[in-house]
Image: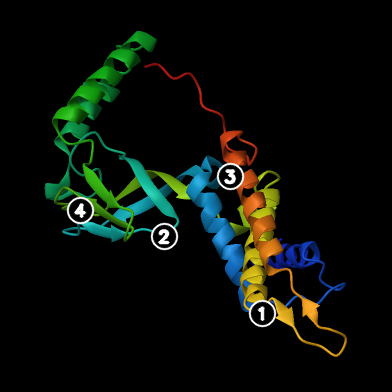
Amino acid sequence: MSTSDARKKLIDQIRLELAYGIVNVELDPEHYEHIVDVSLDKYRQKSSNSVEESYGFLELQPNQSDYVLPKEVIEVRQLFRRGIGGSSTGGGTHIDPFAMAYTNMYLLQSGRQGGLATYDFFHQYQELVGRMFGRDINFKYNSNNNTLTIVRQVRAPETVVMWLYNYKPDDVLINDIYAKPWIRDWAVCEAKMILGHAYSKFSNIVGPQGGTTLNGEALKAEATAMMEKLEMEFQNYGEGSEPLTFVIG
């Protein structure tokens, strides 16, 4: 199901929750789009089920430090490289001496030395050399403008792997077995709150048979009570987030 289809189906369910078809619901399509956006924002603000781990590739360019990532990315945890130090691509002056040392000292002698212990020892050597000679890339990620800043002068093109935390797309949350009911219920509360504010402006409408009393205050009270109940779902992990593990201290 596409994003537009999932969103349309959710809006149709919100209309039915408001008794659309039985009574006249004075909400425009813009209101339904707004309350769905508000509900998704609220869920992402409160629930750990709204984020996921992912991996992405980034092509580093020479003499460029800043890279703008998609708006869904909320944290860059680590960057992974292919080489041990320096730049792992290119030739001539861009040859990595530590990668060449790896080839010379280990791979060319693989027929004379080997075994799991040797692999483990060389892996520790690789980690030490990496820490000392630039395998790890220092960076800073600004989640406000989605800018990743590489704290290093890149001298040759290089592809790195990013370990990311990002928001789940809208259609994934709307179709999630745990998130969907919460988002729908919160959206219904937002709709009742909008209708309640509108009805409260004119609590009584004069008519030929004595007039009509609108239930604006009742709708707002009902929406407020339901919102408090939905807020408790986060504490009880009923909206799909994982409970806390052992906490020491």
Say which residue appears at 21% left-offset and 44% top-offset.
87
Disc nearest the viewer among 3 and 4:
3
Say which residue appears at 78% left-offset and 61% top-offset.
17
Q: Amino acid at mark 4?
A: Ala
Name the residue that disc number 4 marks.
Answer: 156
Q: CA distance from mark 2 to mark 3?
A: 26 Å
Disc nearest the viewer among 1 and 2:
1
Of label 2 and label 4, which has the lower sequence position? 2
Name the residue that disc number 1 marks.
Answer: 202
Q: Quadrant of the C terminus?
A: top left
In the foreground, 146 or 49? 49
Q: Amino acid at mark 1?
A: Phe
Q: CA distance from mark 2 to mark 4?
A: 27 Å
**Residue 101: x percent and y percent?**
18, 28
Q: Left or right: where does residue 76 sit relative to residue 126?
A: right
| Disc 2 packing (10 Å; few <14; some 14–19; many ≥20) | few
**Residue 235: x percent and y percent?**
57, 35
Badge 1 element: loop
Contact flag, marks 1 and 3 (Cβ < 8 Å) = no
| Disc 4 packing (10 Å; few <14; some 14–19; many ≥20) | some
User: Disc number at residue 185?
Assistant: none
Badge 2 element: loop
Contact flag, marks 1 and 2 (Cβ < 8 Å) = no
Name the residue that disc number 3 marks.
Answer: 231
Q: Amino acid at mark 3?
A: Glu
- Which quarter of the picture shows residue 178? top right
Say which residue appears at 66% left-offset and 77% top-offset.
29
Q: Does 141 sit above or below residue 195?
A: above
**Residue 106: x percent and y percent?**
26, 21
Disc nearest the viewer among 4 and 1:
1
User: Disc number at residue 71?
Assistant: 2
Q: Does 228 sit above or below residue 219?
A: above
